[in-house]
Image: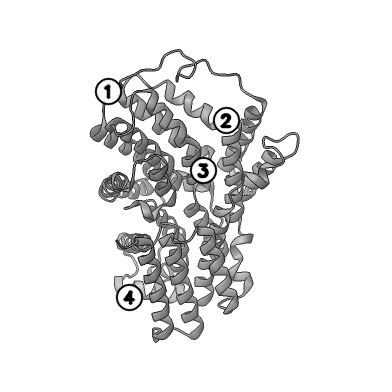
Amino acid sequence: MLDARKVIAVLSALAALALLLWPPSQFSPEMTHAAALCVFALGLFAAGLFPEHVSAVLFFLIAMLFAVAPASVVFSGFHSTAFWLVFGGVIISVAVSETGLGARVAQFVAVRLTASYLKIIIGVSTVGLLSAFLIPTGMGRVVVLCPLIMALADRFGFVVGTRGRTGILLAFCFCAIFPGFTILPANVPNVILMGGIESQYGIYLSYAEYTLLHFPVLGLMKCIVVVGLVWLIYREPPRLCGSEDDDGVTATPQPFRITELRLAGILAGALFLWMLDFVHHISPGWIALGAAFLCLMPRYGVLPPTAFATKINFTPLFTTAGILGIAGVVAYSGIGDLLGHAMLDAADLSHGEQGRTLIALVASSMGVGLAGTVVSIPAIMTPLAGGVSEATGMPLDVLLMSLALAYSTVFLPYQLPPLLVGAQVTGLGLAVTSRFCLILAAITLVVLLPLDYLWWSVLGYLG
């Protein structure tokens, strides 16, 4: 039986080799080398044949050995604010787990909504949605909270293999991951978009504006759709309600520890600053870095001194730096402008065709996401937005924000690593997760994206 990961990796390597041997006539030698490297590197990220940080290191190595771009371009991701936003998110995720604050928040919400299956689904979905504001990485939310949600499912009588358990886990995973696309610091594609916009166009991306544009429809309404789908497909009556016992769901909660209170204060302060960035103009990355410092600070922090060496996972950091490096190489080589014009020629776009331009850009971006992962959409399409704006006359900020519509629409789990991990950690499996993903994507295309377009119109964001 063929290993899909190996097939994707081999195909990307062959595509890179074909570019080197038979480059398009419009490509200069520098463009050819950059395109081959980017195709190969993105193929490795998409295949998952190597751990993501290994793929990032290999990209850095090849780029420098063959002088594909200057070091300042290849390693530009490390001095991007997006990199430090992910760094802060990793530290916060560890702190939420180590202090027990995440488990306490999840239990507090879920316990109060257990009278029926619908209330259980609403409870775990609310936990997932709130966690997107508290834990700035989708992977962190899945890893930290999935074990608690599985334990709650067991306590309510939904053992492994039951439809009710499947629905509970799907509701949590999807509501913990997908609203993150609408909250600026909450996942990697957002921060890559932020880093790319900042480095390539000098545009500051506002937390408040981004959330206002995307969260009401693609965040909150999508969660409501998830709850409705789960209730329709997987509902089952609870076999066991919480009772007062030593390990039951409704057992008397323990008093807050000092580390939990400190962390709650740090998170509240960071969230407050993120929400008011349009006033103080401090980048979300530096706010996250400040929160990380407070978590790590000796004596007054919430993590022991050894946590940085033993608890921190640096994979998301190198992955972010690698993807931003690929975006930088694409922009530096001029491939972005060339591909932008090719896309425009194929779509035959012109001035004044706002709706057609948005549809073409979003559809092209979704195609990029299907070819790899959703992370590749902001990496590849951000450099193209400038060319589209020049050719059509549409505001650049509108086109850049439309990329979120594409990378928040996921057709299959392989496109979204946290969802892939969630399917494995919870035992849902890829078949069940893929079916639910396709149903949600279809509803998003037919209902939610048009509604989001109307929402932007109501806000006056579209001319």
Residue 140: numbered disc: 3
Name the one closer to the observer, 189 or 359: 189
Whether residues under marks 4 and 2 lie with C-beta atoms below 8 angstroms apart, the answer is no
The answer for how far apart the CA atoms under marks 1 and 2 are is 30 Å
How dense is the environment of label 1, judged by Cα within 10 Å: few (below 14), some, or many (20 and up)? few
Give the image location of residue 432, x and y in percent. Answer: 29, 44
Quarter holding the N terminus is bottom left
Whether residues under marks 3 and 4 lie with C-beta atoms below 8 angstroms apart, the answer is no
Q: Which residue is mark 1?
A: 237
Name the one closer to the observer, 155 or 352: 155
- Looking at the image, is mark 3 or mark 4 earlier in the sequence? 3
The answer for how far apart the CA atoms under marks 3 and 1 are is 30 Å
Give the image location of residue 399, x and y in percent. Answer: 42, 60
Residue 345: numbered disc: 4
Residue type beneath disc 4: Asp
Residue type beneath disc 3: Gly
Q: Which residue is mark 2?
A: 100
The answer for how far apart the CA atoms under marks 3 and 4 are is 41 Å
Q: Is 156 drawn above or below residue 196 in the view shown?
A: above
The answer to whether any part of residue 395 appears in the image is: no
